[in-house]
Image (cartoon, rainbow, N blue to C red):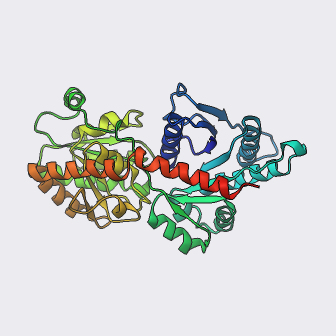
Amino acid sequence: MKIGITCYPTYGGSGVVATELGIELAARGHQVHFITSSQPFRLTGRESNIHFHEVSASTYPLFEYPPYDLALASRMAEVADFYSLDLLHVHYAIPHSVCALLASQMLATHPDPARRRNLPFITTLHGTDITLIGLDPSYLPITRFSIEQSHGTTAISAHLADRTREAFGVTSEIEVIRNFVNTDVYVRRPELVEQMRPRFAAPGEPLLVHLSNFRPVKRVFDVIEVFARVCRELPARLMLIGDGPDRSHAEQLALRYNIQDRIHFLGKQDDVHELLPLADLLLMPSQMESFGLAALEGMSCSVPAIATRVGGVPELVEDGVNGLLFNIGDVDAMAEAAIALLKDTDRHQAMSQAARRTAVERFSTTSIIPLYEQYYQRILDRTKG
């Protein structure tokens, strides 16, 4: 197939999933065209069967903001026409699904009758495009319209699919295709751990990790609160991977607890798969997670998660088996559980093994990517004409 993919190319779950999906599809022989404002950060530019098409919106004194949406729709249509794409797959409803609809209509009504054709598009819902931005009264009608006009719609968890139906009254089909991880890449390699871990923790020091874009919904302050409590009982260390608006406050909180010298603020990192296996526990105390990709990536590296019982997380983390779940903001219980688990070597090992097993058996690329391929074919068969 020839597939066009549009996503937000910067750090964030939707962009990560879209990019990894494109990489996996290309590896399986499909021709993948990324149509985005910049090259997605996980692409090297050297992958086979992957092409990148930049979208740039012209500036003009009359426009207060460059009309990126219109530029994206035009570029989608151009790429689809030139490369004879079979379909578009857009990630994050706003504004990508509306742009894909415009591109589809542009090709269906092309001035040259010989170049008119169907261009189906699929929208994948990732979370805040539905639970936050899409519910804004300014965007709710257009979000509902774009979902209903999509030739296919997928959601990354059953929770998100249900939430979309409830919030928007959507009656069209929403296919649940959960997030995935390349378990051959996200894996604990003892030799690499032995080499890299001393940079972050001394022998006998437990190492915790948090990975996010440091927005309020990720509750990075709770990460600091939990870690401060753990430090009272254990000589622990913490890796904070990512960056965002809450980083400065997190640093100030670490200073207040006098644990700043035990925390590694690593900023944004490309080689997350090399850092996660170094840790013993992953902290994900989010206000909301439609799936919990960071937890899955950690689990694939044999790192169990201490997470909140929200959104689609219980579809991934089985409390007491491959991780631990808590109520939002219950930092005392999270810290107490982390300390107990880190002290209980046998239980920690069993949970680590269960986490890895869950990733391999239920969420690996070999399990999930074929579901997308099958769904693409269903949409193509349905829209033939």
* Residue drawn at point x = 24 percent, y = 37 percent: 278
145 to 25, vertically: above or below = below
Confirm whether residue 317 shows in the render: yes
The quadrant of the image that shows the C terminus is: bottom right
Nearer-the-camera pick, 61 or 379 = 379
Left or right of 201 in this view: 85: right
* Residue drawn at point x = 64 percent, y = 42 percent: 4
Left or right of 341 in this view: 164: right
59 to 139, vertically: above or below = above
Nearer-the-camera pick, 299 or 254 = 299
* Residue drawn at point x = 9 percent, y = 50 percent: 346
The image shows residue 286 at horizontal and vertical percentages of: 37, 58
92 to 270, vertically: above or below = below
Nearer-the-camera pick, 10 or 331 = 10
Question: How many numbered marks are there?
Answer: 0
Nearer-the-camera pick, 29 or 152 = 29
218 to 55, vertically: above or below = below
The quadrant of the image that shows the N terminus is: top right
Left or right of 36 in this view: 19: left
Confirm whether residue 264 shows in the render: no
* Residue drawn at point x = 75 percent, y = 49 percent: 103
The image shows residue 248 at horizontal and vertical percentages of: 39, 45
Q: Quadrant location of residue 333?
A: bottom left
The image shows residue 33 at horizontal and vertical percentages of: 63, 37
The image shows residue 42 at horizontal and vertical percentages of: 48, 35
